[in-house]
């Protein structure tokens, strides 16, 4: 039942994007795919192999306000959808691709959402990638909750750059890495580990909407889905 709903949602989005696509966008999407493959090379080097039982589809540009990823578990397919603004802002396209790439690295099973660890890792990785490739700088401080996520993940990575890669040899799915494993492998405090293993969406839900670079959350996701069917 849930699968069916999901498939219907996907078809709706597919149809919508096809309708909105101009001819020139097709070659742009191919360029995005090339960049995505380069991003995966880098991400795999840093965080371990992608679950390649899932097929990668060419990224699509949408009229949505934010990017997101659809994972079709029964068909083992994934597709990244970029925001409308990414079309005119190359740095934003890169940011969204790099962020979503982390969610595609190890898709979560049914009934699970990303943890703070996965969401923070996605945004940290994406910001670093964009800083390097486009020479952009990202500021903190516009939202305490987002800052806490970024800070927790930065601290974890600063201690040991290859910690995610090592963790994933024990638990390949990033959002299934639990606090026990984090304490054991990363040597962090239990309270820090508990925070990182918290469900990101429930953490974010108590958040008032805001704008900024790091707003890759459930709020924007919901806003985006609303805009498509309005
Ligand atoms: Zn995300």
Image (spheres, rainbow, N blue to C red):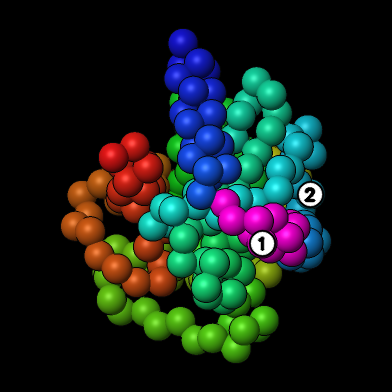
In the drawing, does residue 76 fall left or right of residue 148? right
Q: Which secondary structure lies at badge 1? A: helix
In the displayed orientation, state which residue is furthest to the front.
23
Q: Circle 2 sits on which residue? A: 49
Query: Is 28 one of the magenta-colored residues?
Result: yes
Residue 56: quadrant of the picture:
top right
Q: Is residue 195 visible?
A: no
| Mark earlier in primary sequence (1, 2) | 1
Q: Is residue 58 visible?
A: yes
Q: Residue at x 46, y 11 (%)?
A: 1
Residue 76: quadrant of the picture:
top right
Image x and y of residue 71, in percent = 59, 35
Q: Quadrant of the C terminus?
A: top left
Q: In the picture shown, does residue 194 fall above or below 143?
A: above
- Magenta residues, start to end: 21-33
Out of 52 and 37, give the one closest to the viewer: 37
Q: Residue at x 73, y 35 (%)?
A: 54
Query: Is 22 one of the magenta-colored residues?
Result: yes
In the drawing, does residue 91 fall left or right of residue 145? right
Out of 46 and 123, give the one closest to the viewer: 123
Out of 14 and 37, give the one closest to the viewer: 14
Residue 28: quadrant of the picture:
bottom right
Q: Which secondary structure lies at badge 2? A: loop
Q: Residue at x 66, y 62 (%)?
A: 24
Out of 204 and 131, give the one closest to the viewer: 131
Label 2 neighbourhood size at 10 Å, few (<14), some (14-19), many (20+)? Answer: some
Image x and y of residue 10, in percent = 52, 31
């Amino acid at each position: 039942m849930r699968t069916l709903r999901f498939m219907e949602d996907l078809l709706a989005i597919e149809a919508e994007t096809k309708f909105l696509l101009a001819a020139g966008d097709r070659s742009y999407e191919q360029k995005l795919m090339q960049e995505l493959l380069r991003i995966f090379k880098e991400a795999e080097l840093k965080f371990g192999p992608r679950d390649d039982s899932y097929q990668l589809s060419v990224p699509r540009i949408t009229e949505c306000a934010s990017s997101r990823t659809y994972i079709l578990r029964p068909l083992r397919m994934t597709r990244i959808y970029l925001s409308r603004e990414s079309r005119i802002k190359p740095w934003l396209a890169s940011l969204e691709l790099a962020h979503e790439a982390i969610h595609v690295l190890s898709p979560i099973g049914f009934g699970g959402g990303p943890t703070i660890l996965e969401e923070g890792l996605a945004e940290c990785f994406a910001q670093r990638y964009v800083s390097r490739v486009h020479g952009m700088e990202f500021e903190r401080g516009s939202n305490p909750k987002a800052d806490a996520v970024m800070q927790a993940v930065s601290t974890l990575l600063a201690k040991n750059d290859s910690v995610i890669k090592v963790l994933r040899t024990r638990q390949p799915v990033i959002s299934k890495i639990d606090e026990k494993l984090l304490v054991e492998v990363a040597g962090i405090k239990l309270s820090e580990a508990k925070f990182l293993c918290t469900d990101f969406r429930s953490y974010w839900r108590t958040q008032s909407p805001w704008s900024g670079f790091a707003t890759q959350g459930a709020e924007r996701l919901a806003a985006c889905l609303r805009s498509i069917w309005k």
